[in-house]
Image (tube, rainbow, N blue to C red):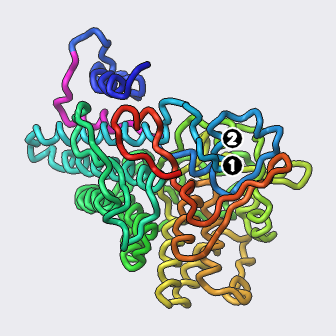
Amino acid sequence: MKTKIHFFITLAFTLFIVYACTNSDFLNVKPNSTILTPSTLEDVQKLLNHNINLCSGLAVMSSDEYVVNEQDWNVATAIERNAYVWAKDLYEGTRGILDWDRPFRAVFYANNALAVLQTLEPREAEQVMYDDLKGQALFKRAFASYELIRNFCKPYEEASAETDLGIPIRKEPAIDRLVQRSNLADSYQFVLDDLKRAAQLLGPRLGSNLFRPNDAATHALLARIYLDMGRYAEAELHADSTLLLYDRLIDYNTVSTTSATPFPNTHDELIFNAMTVGLYSFTTSGSLPRRYRMSEDLMDSYVANDLRLQLYFVSDNEGRYIMKRGYYGTGLYPFTGLAVDEIYLVKAECLARSGKEEQAVEVLLALLDKRYVSGKTPSANDILDDKTVLEVVLEERRKELVWRGLRWQDIKRYNREGYNITLTRSLGGQTYTLPANDPRFVFPIPDDEIEYSGITQNDR
Protein backbone atom coordinates (compact mmCIF):
# COMPACT_ATOMS: atom_id res chain seq x y z
CA MET A 1 0.00 0.00 0.00
CA LYS A 2 1.38 3.37 -0.96
CA THR A 3 1.99 5.46 2.14
CA LYS A 4 1.26 9.14 2.42
CA ILE A 5 4.96 9.98 2.41
CA HIS A 6 5.42 8.15 -0.89
CA PHE A 7 2.48 10.02 -2.29
CA PHE A 8 3.88 13.42 -1.41
CA ILE A 9 7.40 12.53 -2.52
CA THR A 10 5.98 11.62 -5.91
CA LEU A 11 4.09 14.88 -6.01
CA ALA A 12 7.18 16.84 -5.03
CA PHE A 13 9.35 15.30 -7.74
CA THR A 14 6.81 15.67 -10.50
CA LEU A 15 5.47 19.03 -9.28
CA PHE A 16 2.00 17.58 -9.64
CA ILE A 17 2.33 17.38 -13.43
CA VAL A 18 -0.80 15.24 -13.65
CA TYR A 19 -2.80 18.34 -12.78
CA ALA A 20 -0.83 20.79 -14.91
CA CYS A 21 -2.91 23.10 -17.08
CA THR A 22 -0.06 24.11 -19.35
CA ASN A 23 2.16 22.47 -21.97
CA SER A 24 5.32 24.12 -20.66
CA ASP A 25 8.44 22.00 -20.29
CA PHE A 26 8.62 23.08 -16.67
CA LEU A 27 5.45 21.27 -15.61
CA ASN A 28 5.73 18.39 -18.05
CA VAL A 29 9.00 16.90 -16.88
CA LYS A 30 9.08 13.12 -17.39
CA PRO A 31 9.54 11.10 -14.17
CA ASN A 32 12.92 9.79 -15.37
CA SER A 33 14.28 13.15 -16.54
CA THR A 34 16.29 15.64 -14.58
CA ILE A 35 14.03 17.42 -12.11
CA LEU A 36 13.79 21.11 -12.88
CA THR A 37 13.69 23.62 -10.07
CA PRO A 38 11.32 26.57 -10.56
CA SER A 39 13.51 29.61 -10.94
CA THR A 40 11.48 32.43 -12.51
CA LEU A 41 8.36 34.39 -11.72
CA GLU A 42 6.64 32.64 -14.62
CA ASP A 43 7.48 29.29 -13.03
CA VAL A 44 5.93 30.42 -9.77
CA GLN A 45 2.73 31.41 -11.55
CA LYS A 46 2.54 27.92 -13.05
CA LEU A 47 2.82 26.44 -9.57
CA LEU A 48 -0.16 28.52 -8.51
CA ASN A 49 -2.37 27.76 -11.54
CA HIS A 50 -3.98 24.79 -9.82
CA ASN A 51 -6.30 23.71 -7.04
CA ILE A 52 -9.71 24.57 -8.45
CA ASN A 53 -11.62 21.62 -6.95
CA LEU A 54 -10.32 21.70 -3.39
CA CYS A 55 -13.34 22.30 -1.14
CA SER A 56 -15.12 19.59 0.79
CA GLY A 57 -18.07 17.81 -0.76
CA LEU A 58 -18.80 16.30 2.65
CA ALA A 59 -20.21 19.61 3.85
CA VAL A 60 -22.73 19.68 0.99
CA MET A 61 -23.72 16.04 1.40
CA SER A 62 -24.23 16.35 5.17
CA SER A 63 -26.38 19.47 5.14
CA ASP A 64 -30.17 19.78 5.16
CA GLU A 65 -30.57 21.16 1.64
CA TYR A 66 -31.63 17.90 -0.06
CA VAL A 67 -33.18 14.46 0.39
CA VAL A 68 -32.86 11.10 -1.37
CA ASN A 69 -35.06 8.03 -1.29
CA GLU A 70 -33.89 4.63 -0.11
CA GLN A 71 -33.56 3.16 -3.59
CA ASP A 72 -31.26 5.91 -4.80
CA TRP A 73 -29.36 6.02 -1.50
CA ASN A 74 -28.54 2.32 -1.86
CA VAL A 75 -26.66 2.83 -5.14
CA ALA A 76 -24.55 5.75 -3.91
CA THR A 77 -20.95 5.30 -2.83
CA ALA A 78 -20.20 4.36 0.77
CA ILE A 79 -19.03 7.85 1.72
CA GLU A 80 -22.09 9.49 0.16
CA ARG A 81 -24.42 7.09 1.98
CA ASN A 82 -22.64 7.61 5.28
CA ALA A 83 -22.49 11.39 4.97
CA TYR A 84 -26.23 11.49 4.32
CA VAL A 85 -27.04 9.71 7.61
CA TRP A 86 -24.08 11.14 9.58
CA ALA A 87 -22.60 7.70 10.23
CA LYS A 88 -19.75 7.54 12.74
CA ASP A 89 -17.69 5.44 10.33
CA LEU A 90 -17.78 7.92 7.49
CA TYR A 91 -15.12 6.49 5.19
CA GLU A 92 -15.44 2.72 5.71
CA GLY A 93 -11.75 2.23 5.01
CA THR A 94 -11.67 4.36 1.86
CA ARG A 95 -8.18 5.78 1.28
CA GLY A 96 -7.06 9.03 -0.26
CA ILE A 97 -9.95 11.21 0.91
CA LEU A 98 -9.78 14.26 -1.35
CA ASP A 99 -11.60 16.48 1.16
CA TRP A 100 -8.44 16.23 3.28
CA ASP A 101 -5.76 15.68 0.63
CA ARG A 102 -6.69 18.40 -1.88
CA PRO A 103 -6.39 21.34 0.56
CA PHE A 104 -3.01 20.08 1.73
CA ARG A 105 -1.96 19.76 -1.91
CA ALA A 106 -2.89 23.44 -2.35
CA VAL A 107 -0.87 24.33 0.75
CA PHE A 108 2.09 22.40 -0.72
CA TYR A 109 1.89 24.38 -3.95
CA ALA A 110 1.65 27.68 -2.08
CA ASN A 111 4.57 26.87 0.19
CA ASN A 112 6.71 25.90 -2.80
CA ALA A 113 5.82 29.17 -4.51
CA LEU A 114 6.73 31.17 -1.41
CA ALA A 115 10.01 29.29 -1.03
CA VAL A 116 11.00 30.06 -4.62
CA LEU A 117 10.05 33.72 -4.25
CA GLN A 118 12.37 34.01 -1.26
CA THR A 119 15.28 33.07 -3.50
CA LEU A 120 14.50 35.65 -6.18
CA GLU A 121 15.44 39.31 -6.31
CA PRO A 122 12.97 40.94 -8.69
CA ARG A 123 14.02 43.78 -10.93
CA GLU A 124 12.09 47.03 -10.58
CA ALA A 125 9.96 46.14 -13.58
CA GLU A 126 9.07 42.79 -11.97
CA GLN A 127 8.10 44.07 -8.52
CA VAL A 128 4.36 44.26 -9.22
CA MET A 129 4.30 40.69 -10.53
CA TYR A 130 6.45 39.51 -7.63
CA ASP A 131 4.10 41.06 -5.08
CA ASP A 132 1.06 39.65 -6.85
CA LEU A 133 2.53 36.14 -6.84
CA LYS A 134 3.36 36.35 -3.16
CA GLY A 135 -0.17 37.56 -2.47
CA GLN A 136 -1.64 34.71 -4.52
CA ALA A 137 0.39 32.14 -2.61
CA LEU A 138 -0.55 33.55 0.80
CA PHE A 139 -4.22 33.73 -0.16
CA LYS A 140 -4.33 30.18 -1.52
CA ARG A 141 -2.55 28.80 1.52
CA ALA A 142 -5.07 30.60 3.72
CA PHE A 143 -8.08 29.50 1.66
CA ALA A 144 -7.00 25.84 1.74
CA SER A 145 -6.09 25.93 5.44
CA TYR A 146 -9.43 27.45 6.36
CA GLU A 147 -11.18 24.78 4.30
CA LEU A 148 -9.54 22.20 6.54
CA ILE A 149 -10.40 24.12 9.70
CA ARG A 150 -14.09 24.49 8.99
CA ASN A 151 -14.55 20.82 8.12
CA PHE A 152 -12.19 18.98 10.46
CA CYS A 153 -12.30 21.20 13.56
CA LYS A 154 -14.89 22.24 16.11
CA PRO A 155 -16.68 25.58 15.70
CA TYR A 156 -14.58 28.45 17.02
CA GLU A 157 -15.27 29.43 20.61
CA GLU A 158 -12.94 31.96 22.16
CA ALA A 159 -13.11 30.39 25.61
CA SER A 160 -11.82 27.01 24.39
CA ALA A 161 -9.93 27.89 21.19
CA GLU A 162 -6.52 27.53 22.82
CA THR A 163 -7.27 23.96 23.87
CA ASP A 164 -9.50 22.79 21.00
CA LEU A 165 -7.66 20.96 18.25
CA GLY A 166 -6.88 22.84 15.05
CA ILE A 167 -5.03 21.66 11.95
CA PRO A 168 -1.41 20.76 11.20
CA ILE A 169 0.03 24.15 10.20
CA ARG A 170 2.46 23.84 7.31
CA LYS A 171 4.57 26.92 6.57
CA GLU A 172 7.21 25.30 4.39
CA PRO A 173 7.22 22.75 1.54
CA ALA A 174 9.17 20.07 3.45
CA ILE A 175 7.37 16.78 2.92
CA ASP A 176 9.44 14.64 5.26
CA ARG A 177 8.61 16.54 8.45
CA LEU A 178 5.62 15.37 10.44
CA VAL A 179 3.50 18.20 11.79
CA GLN A 180 1.02 17.64 14.62
CA ARG A 181 -2.22 19.54 15.07
CA SER A 182 -1.97 23.06 16.46
CA ASN A 183 -4.68 24.47 18.65
CA LEU A 184 -7.69 26.09 17.04
CA ALA A 185 -6.73 29.64 18.03
CA ASP A 186 -3.32 29.36 16.35
CA SER A 187 -4.86 27.72 13.29
CA TYR A 188 -7.26 30.60 12.77
CA GLN A 189 -4.55 33.17 13.44
CA PHE A 190 -2.30 31.56 10.85
CA VAL A 191 -5.04 31.96 8.24
CA LEU A 192 -5.91 35.52 9.26
CA ASP A 193 -2.26 36.60 9.16
CA ASP A 194 -1.79 35.17 5.66
CA LEU A 195 -4.87 36.97 4.39
CA LYS A 196 -3.93 40.31 5.88
CA ARG A 197 -0.50 40.08 4.25
CA ALA A 198 -2.11 39.07 0.95
CA ALA A 199 -4.46 42.06 1.09
CA GLN A 200 -1.46 44.38 0.97
CA LEU A 201 -0.02 42.67 -2.09
CA LEU A 202 -2.89 41.80 -4.43
CA GLY A 203 -4.43 44.11 -7.00
CA PRO A 204 -8.04 44.59 -8.17
CA ARG A 205 -10.36 42.10 -9.85
CA LEU A 206 -9.31 42.16 -13.49
CA GLY A 207 -10.33 40.08 -16.48
CA SER A 208 -12.06 36.72 -16.36
CA ASN A 209 -9.45 34.53 -14.63
CA LEU A 210 -11.09 34.41 -11.23
CA PHE A 211 -9.06 31.41 -10.11
CA ARG A 212 -6.40 33.99 -9.33
CA PRO A 213 -7.27 35.90 -6.15
CA ASN A 214 -7.52 39.67 -5.95
CA ASP A 215 -7.67 42.30 -3.21
CA ALA A 216 -11.45 42.04 -2.87
CA ALA A 217 -11.15 38.27 -2.42
CA THR A 218 -8.87 38.65 0.60
CA HIS A 219 -11.38 40.88 2.38
CA ALA A 220 -14.30 38.67 1.32
CA LEU A 221 -12.62 35.61 2.83
CA LEU A 222 -11.74 37.56 5.97
CA ALA A 223 -15.40 38.59 6.25
CA ARG A 224 -16.48 34.95 5.89
CA ILE A 225 -14.00 33.74 8.50
CA TYR A 226 -14.73 36.45 11.07
CA LEU A 227 -18.46 35.75 10.67
CA ASP A 228 -17.73 32.06 11.30
CA MET A 229 -15.78 33.02 14.43
CA GLY A 230 -18.61 35.20 15.74
CA ARG A 231 -16.44 38.33 15.56
CA TYR A 232 -19.06 40.45 13.88
CA ALA A 233 -17.40 43.86 14.07
CA GLU A 234 -14.39 42.55 12.13
CA ALA A 235 -16.65 40.68 9.70
CA GLU A 236 -18.56 43.88 8.95
CA LEU A 237 -15.32 45.83 8.52
CA HIS A 238 -14.04 43.42 5.90
CA ALA A 239 -17.44 43.18 4.22
CA ASP A 240 -17.29 46.97 3.82
CA SER A 241 -13.74 46.74 2.47
CA THR A 242 -14.84 44.12 -0.05
CA LEU A 243 -17.76 46.17 -1.30
CA LEU A 244 -15.62 49.28 -1.51
CA LEU A 245 -13.33 47.41 -3.87
CA TYR A 246 -15.98 45.45 -5.78
CA ASP A 247 -19.76 45.49 -5.34
CA ARG A 248 -21.47 44.44 -8.56
CA LEU A 249 -24.73 42.51 -8.33
CA ILE A 250 -26.54 40.82 -11.21
CA ASP A 251 -30.13 41.81 -11.86
CA TYR A 252 -31.79 38.40 -12.06
CA ASN A 253 -34.41 39.90 -14.37
CA THR A 254 -31.69 39.84 -17.05
CA VAL A 255 -30.90 36.13 -16.61
CA SER A 256 -32.67 33.36 -18.52
CA THR A 257 -35.10 31.46 -16.31
CA THR A 258 -35.44 28.62 -18.84
CA SER A 259 -31.77 27.78 -19.29
CA ALA A 260 -30.34 24.77 -17.45
CA THR A 261 -27.12 26.80 -17.17
CA PRO A 262 -28.35 30.30 -16.34
CA PHE A 263 -25.01 31.65 -15.07
CA PRO A 264 -21.72 31.88 -16.97
CA ASN A 265 -18.56 30.97 -15.11
CA THR A 266 -17.23 34.53 -15.29
CA HIS A 267 -20.31 36.49 -14.27
CA ASP A 268 -20.10 39.87 -12.56
CA GLU A 269 -20.83 38.79 -8.98
CA LEU A 270 -17.94 36.36 -8.76
CA ILE A 271 -14.86 37.43 -6.81
CA PHE A 272 -12.90 34.19 -6.54
CA ASN A 273 -13.73 30.81 -8.05
CA ALA A 274 -13.52 27.48 -6.25
CA MET A 275 -15.52 24.25 -6.31
CA THR A 276 -15.90 21.06 -4.30
CA VAL A 277 -13.66 18.09 -4.97
CA GLY A 278 -14.64 16.15 -8.08
CA LEU A 279 -15.43 12.94 -6.24
CA TYR A 280 -19.07 12.66 -5.17
CA SER A 281 -20.75 12.49 -8.56
CA PHE A 282 -23.92 10.83 -7.27
CA THR A 283 -24.80 13.64 -4.87
CA THR A 284 -22.96 16.83 -5.72
CA SER A 285 -22.25 16.57 -9.43
CA GLY A 286 -23.95 19.10 -11.67
CA SER A 287 -24.75 16.56 -14.34
CA LEU A 288 -28.41 15.99 -15.12
CA PRO A 289 -30.59 14.14 -14.29
CA ARG A 290 -30.03 14.10 -10.52
CA ARG A 291 -31.21 11.46 -8.06
CA TYR A 292 -31.69 13.76 -5.08
CA ARG A 293 -34.42 16.35 -4.50
CA MET A 294 -34.22 19.67 -2.67
CA SER A 295 -35.74 19.62 0.81
CA GLU A 296 -39.36 20.74 1.02
CA ASP A 297 -38.85 23.25 3.82
CA LEU A 298 -36.21 25.03 1.76
CA MET A 299 -38.36 25.13 -1.36
CA ASP A 300 -41.39 26.34 0.60
CA SER A 301 -39.41 29.41 1.67
CA TYR A 302 -39.37 30.86 -1.86
CA VAL A 303 -42.34 32.92 -3.04
CA ALA A 304 -43.71 33.26 -6.57
CA ASN A 305 -41.98 36.54 -7.52
CA ASP A 306 -38.60 35.37 -6.26
CA LEU A 307 -36.54 34.72 -9.39
CA ARG A 308 -34.16 32.47 -7.50
CA LEU A 309 -36.85 29.78 -7.58
CA GLN A 310 -36.62 29.65 -11.38
CA LEU A 311 -32.90 30.35 -11.74
CA TYR A 312 -31.52 27.99 -9.13
CA PHE A 313 -33.91 25.05 -9.53
CA VAL A 314 -35.87 23.04 -12.04
CA SER A 315 -39.05 21.17 -11.19
CA ASP A 316 -39.89 17.62 -12.17
CA ASN A 317 -43.35 16.48 -13.13
CA GLU A 318 -44.24 15.74 -9.51
CA GLY A 319 -43.58 19.21 -8.15
CA ARG A 320 -40.19 18.37 -6.67
CA TYR A 321 -37.06 20.40 -7.36
CA ILE A 322 -33.43 19.76 -8.18
CA MET A 323 -30.55 22.18 -8.67
CA LYS A 324 -29.74 23.54 -12.10
CA ARG A 325 -26.09 23.81 -13.08
CA GLY A 326 -25.58 26.22 -10.20
CA TYR A 327 -24.12 29.60 -9.47
CA TYR A 328 -20.86 28.88 -11.32
CA GLY A 329 -21.94 28.30 -14.90
CA THR A 330 -20.93 24.98 -16.39
CA GLY A 331 -19.01 23.80 -13.34
CA LEU A 332 -20.02 20.23 -12.57
CA TYR A 333 -19.57 20.61 -8.82
CA PRO A 334 -20.93 23.17 -6.35
CA PHE A 335 -19.43 26.65 -6.35
CA THR A 336 -17.67 27.29 -3.05
CA GLY A 337 -15.78 30.45 -3.90
CA LEU A 338 -16.44 34.06 -2.98
CA ALA A 339 -19.05 36.37 -4.45
CA VAL A 340 -20.68 39.74 -3.84
CA ASP A 341 -24.07 38.38 -2.79
CA GLU A 342 -22.51 36.53 0.16
CA ILE A 343 -20.82 39.74 1.29
CA TYR A 344 -24.12 41.67 1.23
CA LEU A 345 -25.54 39.00 3.53
CA VAL A 346 -22.52 39.10 5.83
CA LYS A 347 -22.92 42.85 6.18
CA ALA A 348 -26.68 42.59 6.77
CA GLU A 349 -26.18 39.94 9.45
CA CYS A 350 -23.50 41.92 11.25
CA LEU A 351 -25.68 45.03 11.23
CA ALA A 352 -28.65 43.08 12.59
CA ARG A 353 -26.56 41.54 15.34
CA SER A 354 -25.23 44.94 16.39
CA GLY A 355 -28.73 46.42 16.69
CA LYS A 356 -28.58 48.46 13.48
CA GLU A 357 -31.75 46.88 12.16
CA GLU A 358 -32.86 49.61 9.75
CA GLN A 359 -29.46 49.55 8.05
CA ALA A 360 -29.56 45.76 7.93
CA VAL A 361 -32.93 45.83 6.16
CA GLU A 362 -31.64 48.45 3.74
CA VAL A 363 -28.69 46.25 2.76
CA LEU A 364 -30.92 43.19 2.47
CA LEU A 365 -33.43 44.96 0.26
CA ALA A 366 -30.62 46.18 -2.00
CA LEU A 367 -29.83 42.51 -2.66
CA LEU A 368 -33.45 41.37 -2.96
CA ASP A 369 -34.19 44.14 -5.44
CA LYS A 370 -31.89 42.24 -7.83
CA ARG A 371 -33.56 38.91 -7.05
CA TYR A 372 -37.27 39.61 -7.49
CA VAL A 373 -39.37 40.30 -10.55
CA SER A 374 -39.04 44.00 -11.39
CA GLY A 375 -41.49 46.04 -9.35
CA LYS A 376 -42.32 43.08 -7.08
CA THR A 377 -39.55 43.38 -4.48
CA PRO A 378 -41.16 43.04 -1.05
CA SER A 379 -41.19 45.98 1.33
CA ALA A 380 -39.52 45.97 4.72
CA ASN A 381 -42.87 45.23 6.36
CA ASP A 382 -43.49 42.38 3.95
CA ILE A 383 -40.23 40.60 4.62
CA LEU A 384 -40.36 41.08 8.38
CA ASP A 385 -43.95 39.86 8.91
CA ASP A 386 -43.61 39.47 12.70
CA LYS A 387 -40.08 38.09 12.39
CA THR A 388 -36.96 39.75 13.74
CA VAL A 389 -34.56 41.34 11.28
CA LEU A 390 -31.91 38.76 12.15
CA GLU A 391 -34.31 35.88 11.49
CA VAL A 392 -35.11 37.28 8.06
CA VAL A 393 -31.44 37.84 7.20
CA LEU A 394 -30.55 34.26 8.12
CA GLU A 395 -33.49 32.91 6.10
CA GLU A 396 -32.39 34.91 3.08
CA ARG A 397 -28.84 33.69 3.57
CA ARG A 398 -30.04 30.11 3.29
CA LYS A 399 -32.11 30.85 0.16
CA GLU A 400 -29.44 32.90 -1.59
CA LEU A 401 -26.38 30.75 -0.85
CA VAL A 402 -27.97 27.36 -1.43
CA TRP A 403 -25.70 24.50 -2.59
CA ARG A 404 -22.51 26.52 -2.07
CA GLY A 405 -21.02 24.56 0.82
CA LEU A 406 -21.94 27.18 3.43
CA ARG A 407 -25.08 25.77 5.02
CA TRP A 408 -23.26 23.08 7.04
CA GLN A 409 -20.91 25.62 8.62
CA ASP A 410 -23.82 27.97 9.25
CA ILE A 411 -25.69 25.29 11.19
CA LYS A 412 -22.58 24.66 13.29
CA ARG A 413 -22.18 28.32 14.19
CA TYR A 414 -25.91 28.83 14.84
CA ASN A 415 -25.87 25.89 17.24
CA ARG A 416 -22.84 27.34 19.00
CA GLU A 417 -25.05 30.36 19.70
CA GLY A 418 -27.91 28.30 21.08
CA TYR A 419 -30.19 27.81 18.07
CA ASN A 420 -30.40 24.07 18.82
CA ILE A 421 -30.90 22.95 15.23
CA THR A 422 -31.35 19.17 15.07
CA LEU A 423 -31.12 17.50 11.67
CA THR A 424 -33.19 14.45 10.77
CA ARG A 425 -33.39 12.09 7.80
CA SER A 426 -36.07 9.51 7.07
CA LEU A 427 -34.90 6.54 5.06
CA GLY A 428 -36.45 3.12 4.63
CA GLY A 429 -38.70 3.50 7.64
CA GLN A 430 -35.80 4.54 9.86
CA THR A 431 -35.14 8.01 11.24
CA TYR A 432 -31.59 9.29 11.59
CA THR A 433 -30.90 12.21 13.90
CA LEU A 434 -28.01 14.61 14.34
CA PRO A 435 -28.52 16.65 17.53
CA ALA A 436 -27.18 20.17 17.88
CA ASN A 437 -23.45 20.30 18.70
CA ASP A 438 -23.05 16.56 18.17
CA PRO A 439 -19.40 15.50 17.59
CA ARG A 440 -20.43 14.25 14.15
CA PHE A 441 -20.68 17.85 12.98
CA VAL A 442 -16.87 17.58 12.76
CA PHE A 443 -15.67 15.20 10.07
CA PRO A 444 -13.12 12.52 11.02
CA ILE A 445 -9.58 12.79 9.75
CA PRO A 446 -8.96 10.04 7.15
CA ASP A 447 -7.57 6.78 8.49
CA ASP A 448 -4.51 6.78 6.24
CA GLU A 449 -3.50 10.21 7.57
CA ILE A 450 -3.80 8.96 11.16
CA GLU A 451 -1.73 5.89 10.31
CA TYR A 452 1.00 7.92 8.64
CA SER A 453 1.35 10.98 10.86
CA GLY A 454 -0.15 9.83 14.14
CA ILE A 455 -2.07 13.09 14.58
CA THR A 456 -4.97 13.13 17.01
CA GLN A 457 -8.28 11.89 15.61
CA ASN A 458 -11.51 13.80 16.15
CA ASP A 459 -14.16 12.41 18.46
CA ARG A 460 -17.01 10.96 16.52
Indicate the position of residue 36 as horizontal and vertical percent values.
Answer: 21, 20
Q: Would you place residue 215 above or below residue 112 in this image?
A: below
- The residue to which callout 2 is attached is 81
| Residue 453: assigned label | none
- The residue to which callout 1 is attached is 85
Is 40 on the left-hand or right-hand side of 75?
A: left
Q: Residues within 10 Å of mark 1 (few under 14, many from 20)?
A: many
Q: Secondary structure at mark 2?
A: helix
Indicate the position of residue 222 as horizontal and vertical percent values.
Answer: 37, 64
User: Which residue is found at the position 38% from the left and 24% from the top?
Assistant: 3
* Magenta-span inclusion, residue 36: yes
**Frontmost residue, 198 versus 233:** 233
Indicate the position of residue 49 as horizontal and vertical percent values.
Answer: 36, 37
The quarter holding residue 63 reads bottom right
**Frontmost residue, 15 versus 146:** 146
Is 88 on the left-hand or right-hand side of 258?
A: left
What amino acid type should be assigned to the residue bearing mark 2?
Answer: Arg
What amino acid type should be assigned to the residue bearing mark 1?
Answer: Val
The quarter holding residue 22 reads top left
Q: Would you place residue 221 above or below residue 362 in this image?
A: above
The quadrant of the image that shows the N terminus is top left
- Asked if labels 2 and 1 touch by Cβ distance under 8 angstroms, the answer is yes
Magenta residues span: 35-53
Q: Secondary structure at mark 1?
A: loop
User: Which residue is found at the position 62% from the left and 72% from the top?
Assistant: 420
* Magenta-span inclusion, residue 411: no
User: Which residue is found at the position 33% from the left and 22% from the top?
Assistant: 6
Which residue is at the far top? 32
